[in-house]
Structure formats: structure tokens, C-alpha cells
Image (cartoon, rainbow, N blue to C red):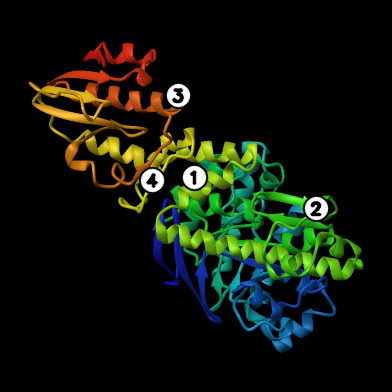
Amino acid sequence: MADVFEITGKDLLGRIGKLYTPHGVVETPTVMPVINPNLMLIEPGELSRYGAQMLITNSYIIYKSERWHDAAVKQGLHSMLGFDGPIMTDSGAFQLSIYGSVEVTNEEIVSFQRDIGSDIGVPLDIPTPPDVSLERAKEELEVTFSRLSAARKHAGDMLLAGPVQGSTYPELREEAARKVYEIGFDVYPLGAVVPLMEAYRYRELVDVIVRSKMGLGPDAPVHLFGAGHPMMLALAVALGCDLFDSAAYALYAKDGRYLTVDGTYHLGSLQHLPCDCPVCTSHTAKELMEMDEKARARLLAEHNLYVTFAELRLIKQSIIDGDLMELVERRCRSHPKMLSGLKRLMDYSAYIEKFDPATKSAFFYLGPESCRRPEVIRHNSLLDNLEVRGSVLITTDRHADSTGFDEVFYVKAPFGVYPEALSETYPIGQSETVDTLEAEARDATLQNIAHFIESHKDAAFTFAYTQEWECPLISDISKHAKTIKL
């Protein structure tokens, strides 16, 4: 793998990076607008004004076109499209997944991408769809491995992507990612995930992404193929995806659909435009509906691009500020299926904690899922290292009488216990929770307290709690500590 990716900022598994290409440096995370030379709603040369740094187009469409093939070879891809920034090209694997075959070999399409000057080319992998048999997934993965290895011989100086396949088998995705990383590529796309996103199967999408990340090295730039809706970008970035591609900006626009970070509206159902981009501040919903189809589609595509890149800027600022998880939680509560993805993300908190920065600006409790954040896991893991002996008081009341105790620990939801020495440090000192203790936060906190007590058997514990903490879990704590209701 060439040294083409530099990480400059991190939060959770998300990062801000620099991707070095022959046509310039791209700051990630970013979305590559998809360009179909036959159906260009917005000219490629105009896309930078909306925030696009890099484009992606389909080399197979160009290869098969009488109009575009020779032009691409003679002029070069960038001149043909009128875009002087980096361009990635797909290989025709999408057409392979739709039609079952393509009229080109792996070697031919990789060589063609190299010859037309693509910055990043993609071999002709096998995009195994979700829910197929394990046997089929393994067989097609072996074909992909063979084609990826062969592609290296034909890429020349072109950067090369190594797609990770494996259908909806998490173990197979991880195994595939490990092997592809060992072969060595410049970018690592996660393939055949569009059906999961189209069916709102975000829980399984989280499995695909995280298990693939587990097989890849931490320095690997990851491309989530076919993902570009602003609603799910924060979640995908938090899981470690760096590049996205979107045809939705144009396809949705032609269908009269209006993208937002909370979902998709049909323009005909809107009386007001909930956005402050140049399109939405210059037109009303009624004016857009009264335009001819082509003009309306153009303006909707512009809006869709504006809202997409605005979300990416917010995501990057959230990484810098260390509050990406708060953004993810807010976004994932916009749809029940997105919320299922957030819950699944929390199942991987122990893994994410290994890469998550130890200190941040603040911790905001936004709901039950906050109880399982990596910061909570890290806090309790570090407490296991404390040597605790003698008579110990754990209390939910900062003003409780601690006379006669050797040590005192206080309680903060959802973390559990903490010593006075950590009261001003992150995350205890920089965390905000709701004024009224929620049952989920209470129970998670009591479970963390019980774990702390059981992990320090050399101490004699007393747990003094106020009325709001009363629940059946107190009886579990009483098995290992004296309990006092204040």
C-alpha cells in the first residue's frame, strides 16, 4: 500500500484525513458525487462550488460507449469531464451485480482505468449481495481475491482500491478485509452494501463496517460504496468510513425528492423549505414546483449537494471538538431503523474505546444509548486498576457524612463511582445529564457500582443512596455491601 493517507484528527473510529492523489490532496471524510457522462444534471466542473473535492464515475460505461471511449483515451478522463481534481473510477461491478455479467475482463478494465488517467481505479470484484448462502459468499470471495491480486500487475502508477466483500457474514467480512489489507491497496471500499441501506438495515450495516475495520489496519482509508445520504453520514464516519459516493443528489432530484439530515421529503409535500442554502433562500417550495422539470431537478440537485457537504463540515468540526457521538445520537434518533444502528454501534463500544481519544471537551447524556458509550466503558475499566482497601463509602449524596471511612467514592450517572480526585477531570467533571434521573441511566450506573464493588474484594463497602436510586438492583448490591437509604 502506498503512503497516501494521513490522519490529522480522530474521534470514536472517525477521523479527519488527507488523501494524496495525483490530482491533489483531498480532506476526508468526503462525498464523491457520482458522474454518469450520459446523464449529467450538473457539469463536473461546477461541482466544486458545492463542496466536492473529488468525483467518481463508472469506467465501464465509458469503456462501452462509442461516444466516450475514444475521447477518454485521447483526451484523458479529466479533460473529457472538465474536472481538474481527483477522479475515482468504478469498474463495472455494479452492472455485474444488476445484470449478472459484463463485457470486459478484470485485466482489461483495470488497464483502461490506468490509461484514461484515473486517480483511483477499482478492480472487477464480485459484489456478493446480502443474504446469500455462506458457500456462495465464500466462492465469490475467492474470485474477488484472485482478481484483486491480478489487478496489481496492471495498475501502473494509478492508485488502486481493494474492495472488501463477504455479504452479510461478519466473520467473512473481517477475514476478507484482513486478506485484502495483506495484499495491499491504497483505498479499501466496502462493497455490496447498497441493498442494506435501501432496506434501512442499519444494524447489519454497522456489523459490516465494524467487522471490516477489525480486519483492516488503522491506517487504511475506507470507502463505503453507494453511501451518500446526509442522514447516515455521521454514523458511518463514527464507524471509521472516510470516503462516500452519492448519485442520490441527482437521482432523487429527478424524482422531486429533497434531502435533509433527518430524512427525505418529496417536494410536493413541502410548503416550506427547511434549509438556508442558496437554493432554499432564493426560492419557495411553490416556485420550485411550478418550474419545468429540468430546471426544478437542477435546483433540487444543488440543494441536495449543499445539504450533504454542510453535514460533512459539521461532522469534521464535531471530530475536532470531540463531540461526534452527540451528533451521531441526534442523527440516529431521526428514524427507528437508524436508532437500531446506534444501538448496534454501542455493542462495539469496547472495541471503539481502543481508538477513541481519552480526553474530550464534554460528555452529554442524550438517552439510554449514552450509558454504553466508550467513555463509560473506559472509566470503569480504569477503576479496576485502583487498589481499594479498608472501609469504603460509596454515596450518591455529596454531602453525606463520611466520618469513620478510609476512602470515599461518589456517584455520577451513567459512569458509576469516582474518587474526589477525578471530580474535575474528563469525563466526570465535563459531563451533563438530565436533572431527573432516568431509569436506564440509574440501572446502568448501579450495575457499574456493583461491578466496582465485586472487583475490589479486599474492601468493606457501604453504599449510601437517596430515594431516586431505589430499585431492585439495590438488593444485588446489598449482597456484597452494606446499603443505607439516606
Which of the marked residues, 4 or 3, is nearer the chain's N terminus?
Answer: 4
Judged left or right of residue 155, residue 422 is left
Residue at 38% x, 39% y is 350
What residue would you read off at disc 2?
Answer: 270
Sequence-earlier tag: 1 or 3? 1
| Residue at 48%, 35% in the rendered image | 369
Which numbered disc covers residue 222? none
- Quote the CA–CA distance across marks 2 and 3: 38 Å
Task: Report x, y in % for residue 333.
Answer: 59, 41
In the image, 134 versus 305, the foreground residue is: 305
CA distance for labels 1 and 3: 32 Å
Residue at numbered disc 3: 439
The image quarter in which residue 244 lies:
bottom right
Q: Mark 4 sits on what residue?
A: 363
Return the residue at label 1: 211
Q: Position of residue 213 (x, y in %)?
A: 47, 50
Name the amino acid, label 1. Answer: Arg
Distance from Cα at disc 4 to Cα at disc 2? 36 Å
The reply to whether residue 456 is in sight is yes
**First reached walking from the N terminus: tag 2 or tag 3:** 2
- Callout 3, which amino acid? Ala
- The amino acid sitting under disc 2 is Leu
**391 relative to 200 in the view: left or right:** left
Q: What residue is shown at x 91% (from left), y 64% (from top)?
A: 290
